[in-house]
Amino acid sequence: MKKPGWLKNAIAKPNGYYSPKGELLKSRNLTQAECDEWNGVKAPKPAPAPAPEFVAEPAPAAEEVESDLPPIEAAVEAAEAEDGFKPKAGSKIVDMFKPRG
């Protein structure tokens, strides 16, 4: 910003330019940004955001369910219990998981 010689020591305020003694030199409506620029006030740099702290949480332990059924048949029974669907005895869904021999 270029300051005219007669206002070089002036202080900018929202309603005009003032001398160091407080006398109004020139009346003018100024924004806060204009006042800051005239008075040489620099905006503070924003502080860097703090780094997030990493807190490792232990993995939840898997519950072990005791079953004397093979894993596939246990899964079929669990699905039956959950939604009430029961496949027919000779259905391909159940038969495709049985070992062929």
Image: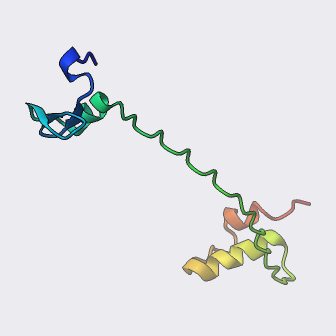
Expressed as whole percent of the image width and height from the top left, the position of residue 2 reads 26, 15
In this view, the residue in front, 83 or 86, is 83
Asked whether, in this view, residue 68 is left or right of residue 86, the answer is: right
- Toward the left, the furthest residue is 27
Q: Nearer the viewer, residue 42 or 15?
A: 15
Image quadrant occupied by the N terminus: top left
Q: Is residue 65 above or below residue 5?
A: below
Residue at 52% x, 45% y is 47
Location of residue 81 (image quadrant): bottom right
Is residue 4 among what the camera can see? Answer: no
Residue 82 x %, y %: 59, 79
Colour theme? rainbow
Q: In this view, does 49 lie above or below 5?
A: below
Q: Residue at x 78, y 69 (%)?
A: 58
Report whether 67 appears left or right of 18: right
Q: Residue 91's x, y, as percent? A: 67, 67
Task: Find residue 12 and report its image quarter.
Answer: top left
Q: Could you tell whether 69 is left or right of 76 in the image?
A: right
Residue 41 horizontal/vertical position (percent): 36, 35
Residue 9 visible in the shown view? yes
Residue at the far front: name it: 21
